[in-house]
C-alpha cells in the first residue's frame, strides 16, 4: 500500500483497486487511505466498490445488459464501455456521469493466450481509430488494459510508446486515460521512480489524468492460505493431502498451470501437496520440507490473495476457508466463516 501511495505522489496517477482480483471488503478500511477508489467488471462489483470502498468508483464490463445499466450508473462516477456498440446504446442513459471507451492497442505482455487481451479476434475494446473518432463527442477518456503480470519496466515503456503511436490523436482529445492493471510495480526491484516518471510524462504530454487499476500489485504477498495435512501416502512419491482444493480455492493455479508458492526450503523431505477434491490433478505443487509431513501439520501457501477469494467455489462441497485478518499488531481476527447453510444456499 505504501508503494502505491508513493507512486501516486511521484507520478500524479490515481490508483483504483481492481475488484475482480481482490474484493475482500473486510480490509477496505485499511486500503482506502492508500488508493483512490475501485474499478469493477460487473454490476455486483461496482455496487460493492461504491458501498464498501467509496471514493472514485469506475464501472466497466465486457457487456452490460439493459436491465442493469441504470443501477450500474447509480453506483458509478465513471463508466467505461467495452465497445462502440455498448457506448452508443447506453450513452444517453449514462450522460449524467463521465463516459469512456476501452481501446485495444493490439499489443500485450501476456504469454498466455487465455489471458491475452490482444489475442486474435479479441472482444476486449475497440482497435480502429477511424471507428472511434466519430464517437469522440460521447466520451472524455479511455481505458487500455494490455499488461499482464508485467514486471519488466522496459516492456511497459515500449508498449506505452506503441499505444502513443497508434492512438496519439485520440489521446490528445482525452481528459483521462486508465492504463489498467497487470503492472507488477510493487514487486521487489521494480524501478518505481522510472515508472512514475514515465506515467507523469505520459500525463503531461496528452494533458490527461492517468489512472492505474492494480489488482495483483495491490495485494502481492499480503495473504496466505492456511491448510492442514489430512493424510499422507507414498505412491512412488511422497504425497500429502490437505483440507483444501486447488480447483475450489486457488483455481488460477490450474488454469495457468502454475504451482502454489511456499516459503523456500531445501530440506530433505520432498512432498507433493494435493487437494482433497476428486480431480486427479488437484495438486498444489511439490516442495521440500525439513521434516517428513504428518497428519495435522500446518502448511502456509504464500501469496494467496489474488484471484482466489473472488473465484472460490463449492466444488465437491469442500469447506470454504474462513477469512481472517492479521492486524498490524500481529493479532488475528476471523471475519468470516462459511458453513453448510452457505453451501446449500449457493445451489437452490
Ligand atoms: C480491465 C482490467 N483492469 C485491471 C485488471 C487487474 O489486473 P491485475 O490483477 O493483473 O493487476 C484487469 C485484469 O484482468 C483488467 O482486465
Image: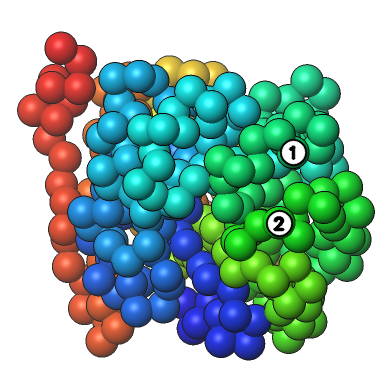
Task: Provide residue 175's location: percent of width, then percent of height.
Answer: 61, 62
Q: Is mark 1 on a helix, strand or loop?
A: helix
Residue 108 occupies quadrant: top right
Sequence-wise first label, 1 or 2: 1
Residue 84 occupies quadrant: top right
- The residue at the point 58 percent across, 52 percent down is 140
Task: Provide residue 37's location: percent of width, then percent of height.
Answer: 39, 64
Q: In which quarter of the image is the C terminus?
A: top left
- The residue at the point 65 percent across, 35 percent down is 135
The way the protein has been coloured in the rendering is rainbow
- The residue at the point 21 percent across, 54 percent down is 51
Q: Is mark 2 on a helix, strand or loop?
A: loop
Task: Provide residue 31's location: percent of width, then percent of height.
Answer: 35, 71
**Where residue 173 is drawn, which disc sits there?**
2
Q: How crowded is mark 1: few (under 14 residues within 10 Å), some or many (20 or more)?
A: few
Q: Which of 179 and 248 is in front in this view?
A: 179
Q: Which of 135 and 191 is in front in this view?
A: 135
Q: Looking at the image, can residue 106 be seen?
A: yes
- The residue at the point 53 percent across, 31 percent down is 87
Residue of label 1: 133
Image vertical order of residue 235 relative to residue 249, above or below: above
Q: Nearer the viewer, residue 306 or 259?
A: 306
Left or right, residue 210 beside residue 222: right
Residue 158 occupies quadrant: bottom right
Residue sticking out furthest to the top: 348
Left or right, residue 179 beside residue 74: right
In whole angstroms, how far apart are the C-alphas of marks 1 and 2? 10 Å
Q: Looking at the image, can residue 117 be seen?
A: no
Amino acid at each position: 500500500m505504501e508503494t502505491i501511495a508513493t507512486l501516486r505522489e511521484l507520478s500524479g496517477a490515481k490508483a483504483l483497486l481492481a475488484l475482480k482480483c481482490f474484493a475482500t471488503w473486510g480490509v477496505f478500511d485499511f486500503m482506502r487511505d492508500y488508493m483512490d477508489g475501485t474499478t469493477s467488471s460487473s454490476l455486483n462489483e461496482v455496487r460493492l466498490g461504491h458501498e464498501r470502498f467509496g471514493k472514485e468508483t469506475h464501472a466497466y464490463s465486457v457487456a452490460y445488459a439493459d436491465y442493469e445499466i441504470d443501477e450500474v450508473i447509480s453506483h458509478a462516477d465513471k463508466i467505461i464501455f467495452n465497445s462502440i456498440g455498448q457506448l452508443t446504446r447506453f450513452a444517453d442513459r449514462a450522460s449524467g456521469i463521465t463516459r469512456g471507451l476501452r481501446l485495444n492497442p493490439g499489443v500485450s505482455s501476456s504469454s498466455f493466450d487465455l489471458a491475452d487481451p490482444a489475442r486474435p479476434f479479441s472482444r476486449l475494446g475497440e482497435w480502429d481509430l477511424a471507428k472511434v473518432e466519430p464517437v469522440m463527442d460521447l466520451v472524455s477518456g479511455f481505458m487500455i488494459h494490455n499488461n499482464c503480470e508485467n514486471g519488466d519496466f522496459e516492456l511497459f515503456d515500449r508498449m506505452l510508446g506503441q499505444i502513443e503511436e497508434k492512438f496519439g490523436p485520440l489521446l490528445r482529445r482525452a481528459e483521462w486515460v486508465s492504463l489498467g492493471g497487470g503492472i507488477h510495480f510493487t514487486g521487489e526491484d521494480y524501478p518505481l521512480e522510472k515508472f512514475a516518471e514515465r506515467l507523469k510524462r505520459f500525463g503531461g504530454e496528452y494533458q490527461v489524468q492517468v489512472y492505474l487499476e492494480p489488482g495483483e500489485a495491490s495485494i502481492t504477498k499480503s495473504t496466505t492460505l492456511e491448510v492442514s495435512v489430512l493424510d499422507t501416502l507414498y505412491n512412488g512419491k511422497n504425497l500429502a493431502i490437505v483440507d483444501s482444493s486447488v480447483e475450489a480455492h486457488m483455481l488460477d493455479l490450474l488454469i495457468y498451470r502454475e504451482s502454489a508458492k511456499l516459503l523456500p526450503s531445501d530440506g530433505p523431505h520432498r512432498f507433493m501437496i494435493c487437494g482433497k477434491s476428486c480431480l486427479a490433478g488437484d495438486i498444489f505443487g511439490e516442495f521440500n520440507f525439513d521434516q517428513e509431513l504428518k497428519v495435522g501439520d500446518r502448511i502456509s501457501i504464500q501469496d494467496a490473495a489474488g484471484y482466489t477469494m473472488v473465484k472460490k467455489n463449492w466444488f465437491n462441497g469442500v469447506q470454504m476457508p474462513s477469512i481472517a485478518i492479521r492486524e498490524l499488531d500481529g493479532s488475528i481476527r476471523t471475519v468470516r466463516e462459511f458453513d453448510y447453510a452457505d453451501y446449500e444456499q449457493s445451489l437452490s
